[in-house]
Image (cartoon, rainbow, N blue to C red):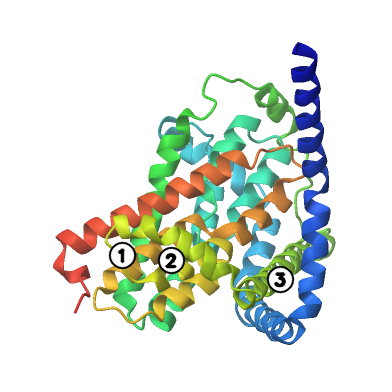
Amino acid sequence: MQNINVHNNIGYKFIFLSIRRNILPAIFCLFTICLVVFSKNNFAAAKEGLMLWANNVVPSLLPFFIATELLSYTNVVNKLGKLLNPIMRPIFHVPGIGSYALLMGIISGYPTGAKIVVNLKEQGLCTQEEAERMLAFTNNSGPLFILGTVGISLFGNSTIGFLLLFTHILACISVGILFRFWKAKNTSSVKIFSKQNNNKKEQVNFSNLGDILGRSILSSIKTVVMIGGFIVLFSVVLSILKNSNVINIIGNLFYPLLRIFGISDVRFSTSLISGILELTNGLTQISLIACKKISINIILSAFLLGFGGFSVLLQVNSIISKSNLSIKSYFIGKLIHGVLAAFYTFLLITYFPIFNFNL
């Protein structure tokens, strides 16, 4: 009897390992088949994703990427770190130099914060644990996107944009405070290493300005092209999921959970699933749902802006993949960020009449 149990356990283990080994190839094969089956709709989706990247992402992110690359060749970052260390260390349990990642992450949007954190770790300016803490709260939606795209373009109201921006930043700071306890007992030798390597990176001057400017532009273009690839890919994935009715099926399964919070329209469920996969698409769908209680649209938008979607998560994962940083802290941090942003938005709409847009 014991031999039979042992053989069964070995069999189950073998099947599990076989499924795990073949799951990604199976998904990629299915994706390729779907590209052919839904080719007409996929072409339109890819074209829309490419236009979104060219018209919105490149103009808004490329200049910031170049600026952050250039600043990394100066002593501005180190000076800012020394200046703000008395604030960042006790509140967030990260070095003062983390303020640079936080500020640029808020100003320029996804995925600038993650890129800066990786640069800081590679330069030996923070430890492994500090970098993972910073990942959780320094990568955020930018004000241009929240105020311009979401507030004015999607909702047609700048006050909604300011409300979402305020709760987004407030939730970001809250996540940073919570994550000060992330691996707090762990210590790293990188602190000693950083003192020896702070000034190892080449400093910009007039003689090497052209070379450094060229390197900064090439590095920034590489990151922006990578982001464009993710946007096009997820636009196509969403198109396939919609045309194969998978989004509606998942939305219907998810719908009972939303009803607990008093959301009775199933369209919010499918739109939220779309936004969890790809941020901009989900926000657009949510803003188009006609509802007398528009506070529902705003609160769900706050959650999506905080979470960022799996498209952004994979962008961040590709950026940190060579730095030995764990994506776990980022995923947990963004999930908490989304929940807190939605909660803060609910409180402001409920207790401050100026933010109540319900009919």
Asked if residue 69 is positioned above or below residue 279 in the image, the reply reads above
At mark 2, the secondary structure is helix
Q: Earlier in the sequence, mark 3 or mark 2?
A: 3
Q: Position of residue 15 (x, y in %)?
A: 79, 37
| C-alpha separation, residue under disc 3 versus residue under disc 2 | 27 Å
Image mark for residue 263: 1
Report the amino acid beneath label 2: Ser
Residue 280 visible? The answer is: yes
Q: Quadrant of the N terminus?
A: top right
Quick one: 80 or 283, which is closer to the camera?
283
Residue 331, given in percent of the width and then of the height, sits at 56, 46
Q: Which residue is mark 3?
A: 228
Residue 44 position, x and y percent, is 69, 86
Residue type for callout 3: Gly
Q: Which mark is residue 269?
A: 2
Judged left or right of residue 45, residue 268 is left
